[in-house]
Amino acid sequence: MPVRARDTDWEGVRLHVVTGKGGTGKTTVAGALALALASSGGRVLLMEVEGRQGIAQLFDSPPLPYEERKVAVAPGSPVTPGGDVYALAADPESALVDYLAMYYNLRHAGRTLTRLGIVDFATTIAPGLRDVLLTGKAVEATRRKSRGRRLYDAVVMDAPPTGRISRFLNTAGEVSGLAKVGPIRSHADTVQSVIRSPQTAVHFVAVLEEMPVQETLDGIAELRGLAQGGLQLGAVMINMVRPTGLTDDQLAAAARGDLDRHELDLGLKTAGIEGTQGPDGSSDVAGALAAELGEHATQMLGQREYRRVLTGAGQPCYDLPLITDGMDLAGLYRLAAALQEQGAA
Amino acid sequence: MSEETPTPPRLDTDRLLDDPRTRIIVCCGSGGVGKTTTAAALGLRAAERGRHVVVLTVDPARRLAQSMGLSGLDNTPRPVPLPDARGDGTLHAMMLDMKRTFDEIVEAHADPDRAEQILVNPFYQSLSSSFAGTQEYMAMEKLGQLRRTDQWDLIVVDTPPSRSALDFLDAPQRLSRFLDGRLIKLLTAPTRASGRAYLKVVNAGFGVFTGIVTKIIGAQVLRDVQTFVAAFDTMFGGFRERAEDTYRLLQTPGTAFVVVATPEPDALREASYFVERLSEDRMPLAGLILNRVHRSPAARLSAARSLAAAEALLPAGAEQAQSAGANGGGAPLAEATKYPLVVAALRLHAERMQLIAVERRLAQHFTAAHPGVPVARVAAQPEDVHDLAALRVIGAALGHD
């Protein structure tokens, strides 16, 4: 493997926030990005915030506690060995206990409060509080030092879906509606200063379908509204991209439904596949394959249009191939490699 | 393999829609599985089969909303014109505005002065627009309202895109528990310091509690909450009652839960959780709708044979040479073989057969775990839903057509 000569597209970014519509593979892409970032030898933290245990499933490990655990070793190159990916499943309750312990030395009180259900209560009456605690945890991990150097070279956050991302990240704004002064407010402001800095980038995962594309555009527009405050938009990661083996002419013909049936018949016969011949002399297999090609072409042409729209949003786009044989670790490494090749890490 | 493959009973949606005893259909499932589309398709199908239907959606995609003639969030059922309807069925559709719904409850249940006081309270504003359970609660509240008007004989509701599908069942109770809860009373105890509850609080270290709450969220928030609770006090009971009513309504036989999923691991896992949870809560489950299932008109041609045939049409070594590029325009393929179209078609077919096999395995796992749950399948559509015609196709696929 050649050593990469150029820089990555996200030099200086240490907190990668990954969002996307449900069903687009947000967690998978976040995992692949973490692997890609770790492959140059660093230590990367992959963090989830929604209590779904998606990371554990992705890395085929038992459910993760509120604790940073090593889940994978990234593939390296002959020159640099691969780094490590750690994972953390964060939840607001544990994050609050953590916060009380870290900033007020109240670990014991925090645990008692959790047992009494008071933490749940506190995060409930101040909805912005949950988000501040979770983003706060990511920011803390990003800045954490050990023996004078950063503990993590990068933190990748599997963030809430596109529909909630701007509210999630705009924690200072959300909390300020509730708390105009006070400790949580100043904590929120600190968190905000990191999120709205060149150290943080927000990436969108999309697939080439109508709703995910629309939500991505809406999400980008919404975050651009926050960008004045320094929020940095990242890349659009187009997931589940399928290659087409057809030329443009063939795609157009297939979509119209007038493919060269003679060529199909002849080719299938040459390959030793015989079907039942219909009245027009063409085989039923050829007809079925032509129908599949037609559907494929319609889809591809639609996807091309969606891609044009996504590219038009002005953010860098990366393609992640569709893994057809079931998503597993091998598939994840393939996605990580694709991200790296395209300069994402 | 000798493993027995279970076949689930078939979910007959037409029978469900035609049965006049079916009064409410709740579509639930994880995000991105086509819940809203399914709700809309079921509603349209029922209306075209003669029922008076209202579809309550939470957050439809723009074009789906447009396909039903909805242009904005206005919290009112709007008639959807049905040019091709047979019989006298009607269809209405509405999008939920959770804040508006909450405001309306406040306006309806408090005197004007008190309502005004509540509506401007910052804590209320935050609660009504961003509390994690408010959307679910308001969807249930709206459902209860629609049911009480008795203007429609079928209500199809699509559930909010929750963090987890289960939130939908828990959130209404959670919100009402929260509003009516002991903790909020503890918190506001100083404003009505009397009775045994307050004494208990003192014993439990109330000072520590408020101290820490103040430390975390600040004294201002605590004051807002107290003001809110004082103004809201009389409405608490009503909230809990209505939440319980709606919850019981969902348990009646007139309700049918439809769990929506796609043949993908996450969606089916969530569907499994949901099926288990519905049974625990004694909620009537109609079945699983499996969306975007892939099929092939040439299913007899296996993936392996298809790939072997494609390879047979290529000279040795050509396979690796051109399989890499993600957007391979086909040019290298055309140079490598006399039959580029056939090679492409065979590969595509093999890919589809592999996908079908994966999907089938996932569906079988679900059925093995829940053998009694009826399943209906909807084939993957090559294009997104933009109009009533496309919704009709889905409804027909669900029915027997």
Image: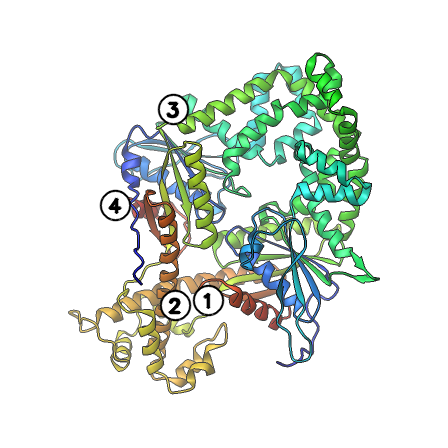
Q: How crowded is mark 4: few (under 14 residues within 10 Å), some or many (20 or more)?
A: few
State the residue at coordinates (38%, 53%). B365
For the residue marked with disc 3, what is the amino acid? Gln
* Residue A203, image quadrant: bottom right
Q: Kindly check if marks 4 and 2 are in contact, taking CB atoms under 8 A apart as contact.
A: no
* Residue B46, image quadrant: top left
For the residue marked with disc 2, what is the amino acid? Glu
Q: How far apart are marks 1 and 2 (CA)?
A: 10 Å
Q: Distance between the residues labelled 3 and 2?
A: 49 Å
The residue tagged with tag 4: helix, strand or loop?
loop
Query: Which tag, 3 or 2, sits closer to the chain's start?
Result: 3
* Res. B151 mark: 3
For the residue marked with disc 4, what is the amino acid? His
In this rendering, the label closer to the viewer, 1 or 2: 2
* Res. B351 mark: 2
State the residue at coordinates (73%, 26%). B224
State the residue at coordinates (59%, 60%). A31
Question: Are dots 3 and 2 on a single chain?
Answer: yes
Question: Which residue appears farthest toward the left when viewing the image?
Answer: A279
* Res. B400 mark: 4
Q: Is residue B69 visible?
A: no
Question: Are dots 4 and 1 on a single chain?
Answer: no
Q: How crowded is mark 2: few (under 14 residues within 10 Å), some or many (20 or more)?
A: some
